[in-house]
Image (cartoon, rainbow, N blue to C red):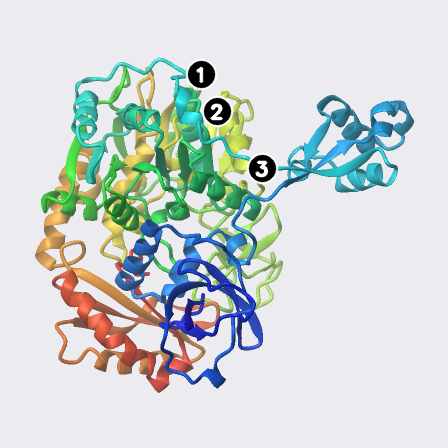
Amino acid sequence: MYIQVALPVPLRQLFSYLPAADQPLPQPGCRVEVPFGRQSMVGVVVTISDHSDLPDNKLKPIDRGLDPAPVLDDTLWQLSRLAARYYCSPIGMVLNQLLPVKLRQGESAQPQPIKLWQLTEAGRRADLDGLKRAFQQQRLLAYLQTQTQIADGDVSKLEFSRQALKALADKGLIEAGERALSFDTDWHQQVTLGETPQVLNREQAVAVAAISGDLDHFGAYLLEGVTGSGKTEVYLHLMEPILRAGKTVLVLVPEIGLTPQTIERFQRRFPVPVGVLHSAMNDNERLQVWQQAQAGALGIVLGTRSALFTAMPKLGMIIIDEEHDASFKQQEGFRYHGRDLAVMRAQLQQVPIILGSATPSMESLYNVASGKYKRLQLTARAGVAQHVKQRIVDLRLQNLDAGLSRQLLEKMEQHLEAGNQVMLFLNRRGFAPALLCHECGHLHGCSRCDAFYTVHQGSGMVQCHHCGSQKRLPHQCHECGSTQLFTQGVGTEQLEQALVQRYPQYPVVRIDRDTTSRKGSLNQLLEKIRRGEARILIGTQMLAKGHHFPDVTLVGLLDVDGALFSADFRASERLAQLYIQVAGRAGRASKPGEVILQTHQPDHPLLHQLTTQGYGPFADAALKERMDAMLPPAGQMAIIRAEATYANQAQQFLNDANHCFDALPIQRVGPMPAPMERKAGKFRYHTLLLANDRKHLQQALEHALPRIEQLPSAKRCRWHLERDPQDLL
């Protein structure tokens, strides 16, 4: 018997191994540890066969089996095979993505006892005054004398010192112990409502009724609602019968920042176990949520795109909030789209899926037009919220103060004096996007990329936001030696400094990747905003999506002109979605809202269409253009990207790869340099592959890829193929 194992390597094949002499034969879906070259790897058994292409003397036995039963259920097994074929990705890479990191490393899939620390008899009798000179030890002992024990994983969370823990153990005041980890799977016996549901308006009631009639079968529903129209309330009404039936609801959100308020809203309505999965959690926390979900101990699983692969035998519904968001697309390794695989999973498990958005993606609108999705619309803001006033401000010939026009400053002062909050959107972090020499005009660029350094004045550094390289802020020009260096442009850091100086009486909060890098910092800043302790909010896209700030009455967009002239055909769609999403943060409660868009292109037709007609007419026109040009979603697209130390190596490979598609019904565009040709020291080129339908593209890729992989030029560069690319830049 031969064990065919999928390993997390970029090779489109399975690897044959012999059974271990003293161990039972592992089943398909179980993990095994195997020798691979000079190292050991964890893989997943795909099949057991009686045939191998290699002779027995060339094969090695597995080191050990890791699971008594498969860790992947039938649904995830089918999903992995479908995803591997559609995205042309090695099955080993796909299966690896489906497992939590701890399982990829070979740890047990069964819940392990929790290590904890508890008082000894001496610790119970100990006098806290005896530790006056050791404050951290005194603090920890005081906690344990009231709580009796603490889980090892909670020591850092509660901000206790590990050194204090060891010191108390050495003194014999505390000792280590274990507690068996058990999951409550009977939570659904008593599903009560923690709050009275809101009364639905007519459109919300229609949406709930349309979906409620078919909860036991697959159905894809596009819930299109203007910002503030109450989409979450529709979700909550639909979740109730699912949870009462003891089934799990999977909720996917695009950003980590949206999880706290979403969890709070769900738990306020349903006091059921909720599991959260996102990149800010450590590996142990993610494994525990995965184990709870697999055991059926969770009513709601909420997370970002990777939560899609959580094992849920009793899945009852999938909800994707902000389904249009580009964050659902994985951009490295196994390059999948979370929204599309979620629809695939819903179909496999025969459960309904709801795609919610104020600005639906062209793909979802196309699926509505072709009859695959049902469209439900919420056109009115919920409660007493009113539609916002919108205004375009012409920046030409204006003197700007840190990127702020006179009109925007006047409006800010009006809203702040009225006791409201103001939000300013600028999708450019750092102090300034460029550093310029006043004498010779030299712009300080990254030595590894075709990009300029961004100035971060707070840390005294310049950093490339593309490759991550950074160095000290220079005081002299590298070209002429002049000390007259000036920053060009405005970033969120500079905007914050200017507003703190101009309005010292109004607290300012900045939310971007720099201010939220520490764990828990984003939640603290958002809570500060909700309590009204911040009056001026500055942020990048992190602040623009899905947040509910009832006191924000003015939203200003400082600079979005770059998206009007992008080389990417999706740029106008993204700008429209961004504008509507940011504008939707204003006037979400009883207070009227106002939006000001600053631009050097006040006559641009896209901006006028968005401010006067909204997203719907734009989306209809954009979808028609895509269909006429046979661009996605009407046509099908893939892209082959290559990068190499020398440009001709990437070009040669793509030229050779192009010939592998000869005589196939595929249009090829390229090779051509990427818009940023050099990044992280590598030259980047790509070729677009276009087809009229999905079947032709799939057949062409399956025919050509094995030949491309055998090309001699493929060994002289790094390359990958991406299906349904969302970013051509």
Residue 290 lies, with reference to residue 90, above or below; the image says: above
**Is residue 427 among the parts visible in the rendering?**
yes
- Earlier sequence position, callout 1 versus callout 3: 3
* Neighbourhood count class around disc 3 (C-alpha, 10 Å): few under 14, some 14–19, many 20 upward: few
* Neighbourhood count class around disc 1 (C-alpha, 10 Å): few under 14, some 14–19, many 20 upward: few
Q: Quadrant of the N terminus?
A: bottom left
* Neighbourhood count class around disc 2 (C-alpha, 10 Å): few under 14, some 14–19, many 20 upward: many
Spatial CA distance of label 2 from label 1 is 8 Å
Residue placed most toward the observer, 202 or 109: 109
Task: Say if mark 2 contacts mark 3, CB within 8 Å.
Answer: no
- Earlier sequence position, callout 2 versus callout 1: 1
Residue 135 lies, with reference to residue 419, above or below; the image says: below
Residue 2 in the image: state x and y as whole percent: 42, 73
Asked which secondary structure carries label 3, the reply is: loop
Give amino acid for label 1: Gly
- Earlier sequence position, callout 2 versus callout 3: 3
Left or right placement of residue 558 versus residue 359 in this view: right
Give amino acid for label 2: Arg
Residue 70 lies, with reference to residue 36, above or below; the image says: above
Residue placed most toward the observer, 395 or 630: 630
Q: Which numbered marker is on residue 535?
A: 2
Q: Report which residue position mark 3 lands on.
A: 181
Residue placed most toward the observer, 686 or 179: 179
Residue 488 in the image: state x and y as whole percent: 46, 52
Quarter of the image for residue 548 reads top left
Asked which secondary structure carries label 2, the reply is: loop
Residue 384 in the image: state x and y as whole percent: 27, 14
Left or right placement of residue 592 versus residue 37 in this view: left
Q: Quadrant of the C terminus?
A: bottom left
Spatial CA distance of label 2 from label 3 is 45 Å
Q: Which numbered marker is on residue 419?
A: 1
Give amino acid for label 3: Leu
